[in-house]
Image (tube, rainbow, N blue to C red):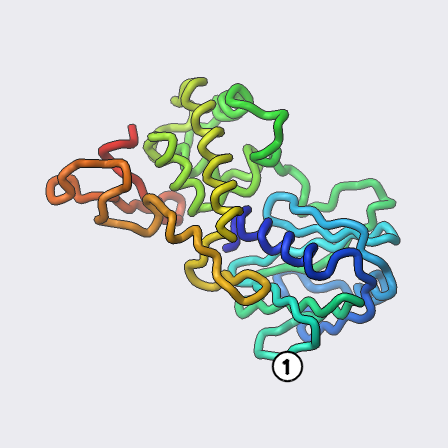
Amino acid sequence: MPELPEVETIKTAIERAIGKATILNISVYNKNLREKIPDDLAKKIVGTKICAYERRAKYILIHLDNKICLIWHLGMSGQIKISSQELERAKHDHVVIETSNGFITYHDARRFGMLTYFDEKENTTPKFLQNLGPEPFDKRIDGKYLYQKLQAKKVAIKVALLDQSVIVGIGNIYASESLYEARILPTRIANSLSLAECTCLLKKVREVLQKAIDAGGSTLKDYHKPDGSLGYFQNMHCVYNKTGQACPDCHCNIQKTGGIQKIVQSGRSTFFCPSLQK
């Protein structure tokens, strides 16, 4: 599933290529995604002008001049393609939005993604955006915030980091990488972390996410940037998907330690260095 850096990369790519264009048409070839695409979507958005783009957690928000806001979630395997001309339709191309500055095509083989809208004039938060924690780059949060949020968490810290009510956008890859950088074992119980450890962890989360954004995200399976190119942060991973290898900062004998280890937590793969992380 695309995580915060991938979604941020895609949002930025759409914003740069399409900008404040007018939506001329929308073609929906399959409404049956995770949430059914509303029947009146075309009526709501065709003829409107895009005013602004935003990422909230792993959602892309596109604000229109009639106060309608598109909500886009890429699910497990969703991809966005941007082109100056309409592309020949491929299998699993479910939506094509034509704008005055080009075409946006939504491709999703598994159909776990979502495209819908909400009316900002109603001044209510759509259900998809409710109960979300703050953004990791929000300057209003600090180590004390994370420490206080974790006091009620009697689960492993890796699992707690995936809880979007604590901090949004941290997915499986970047939780493993951030915990490695902070030298914290992913199996530690969340409320066992000290204030100093929480401060360090939040700092490392921000650093890892920013590096990943700068690198265009991580391409492991389905993720491509909207121009078709790959992200390259996977080449900078320290522990993720590196079972049995030596981590970059460790000088232990991997013949004895086994190198980077992989475990499964709440159904998700976790990677860590048992020598450095405590």
Amino acid beneath label 1: Glu
Residue at 51% x, 41% y: name it: 210
- Determine if residue 62 is in view: yes
Number of numbered discs on residues: 1
Residue at 44% x, 46% y: name it: 172
Residue at 38% x, 30% y: name it: 182
- Residue 9 point in image, percent of width and height: 58, 52
Badge 1 element: loop
Taking the image as shown, residue 24 lies to the left or right of residue 159, namely right
Q: Is residue 76 above or below residue 170?
A: below
Q: Is residue 77 above or below residue 210?
A: below
Q: Which residue is mark 1?
A: 88
138 and 134: which one is in front?
A: 138
If the image is split into quadrants, where does the C terminus sit?
top left
- Determine if residue 32 is in view: no
126 and 61: which one is in front?
A: 61
117 and 243: which one is in front?
A: 243
- Residue 165 point in image, percent of width and height: 58, 35
Residue at 62% x, 27% y: name it: 139
